[in-house]
Image (cartoon, grey):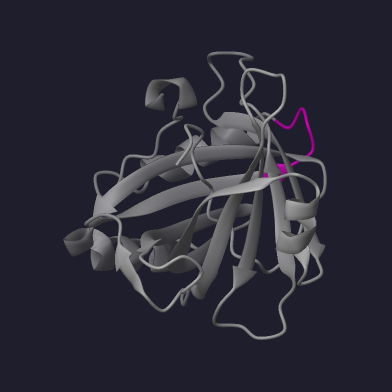
Amino acid sequence: MEAPPVTMMPVTGGTINMMEYLLQGSVLDQSLESLLHRLRGLCDNMEPETFLDHEMVFLLKGQQASPFVLRARRSIDKSGMPWHLRYLGQPEIGDKNRHALVRNCVDIATSDNLTDFLVEMGFRMDHEFVAKGHVFRKGIMKIVVYKIFRILMPGNTDNIEPLSLSYLVELNVVAPAGQDVVSDDMRNFAEQLKPLVHLEKIDPKRLM
């Protein structure tokens, strides 16, 4: 995968030209049930939504130093759902006291010939994976707990294996630019999940 952290938003809706506020962490497989139990007590929905998605990451290389990245995602377990095309901008440097990573986020629903369209536009698929997990909600906050699976045969989402022995955890808010106060609410919520999971403002440059 490329350096920027991947955000697992299940394909159930789209938000156009907004800012994403994000905290990330992980838990080992054996700690999953304890975390889900804590989230059931803290969140609005006691029983989380579930998702099983297939995501393909496309690159368009030009004269710029880094390629342009778009993500195509579809639901595997929910028939009739549209494909989604997602663009995640570079994280804003901004105020270092801001408690969450902030980046531009464009998410649109598309027709099912999305991947053909991207190839015609000159994009090349870099990698693909399956994401399976749970979605909790607390007000405008979305908490996603998921596992990434490697696809062993290109295009065959039935032939997969876990990428690691842990689950990724993301606390996410999508809001108009300038709503930095939401990062305070996110930090307060994240504190309630310790010590089960430590959600942090991840600097993508640290992953390079």
Magenta highlight: main SS: loop
In-image side of 68 versus 184 (left or right):
right
| Residue 177 lies in the magenta-colored region | yes
Q: Is residue 94 visible?
A: yes
Q: Position of residue 51 (x, y in %)?
A: 52, 73
Which residue is found at the position 78% from the left and 41% from the top? 18
Q: Position of residue 14 (x, y in %)?
A: 76, 59
Which residue is found at the position 79% from the left and 63% from the top? 109
Q: State whether residue 28 is above or below residue 60.
A: below
Which residue is found at the position 67% from the left and 29% from the top? 180
- Looking at this rendering, what residue extends furthest in the bottom direction? 79
Quadrant where the image shows the N terminus = top left
Q: State whether residue 159 is above or below residue 65.
A: below
Q: Which residue is at the front of the view, 137 or 135?
A: 135
Q: State whether residue 73 is above or below residue 75.
A: above
Looking at the rendering, the stretch of residues picked out in magenta corresponds to 174-179
| Residue 22 lies in the magenta-colored region | no
Instruction: Using the rendered view, name the quadrant where residue 74 is placed.
Output: bottom right
Q: State whether residue 61 is above or below residue 138.
A: above
In-image side of 164 versus 107 (left or right):
left
In-image side of 79 versus 199 (left or right):
right
- Looking at this rendering, what residue extends furthest in the left direction? 30
Q: Which residue is at the front of the view, 171 or 75?
A: 75
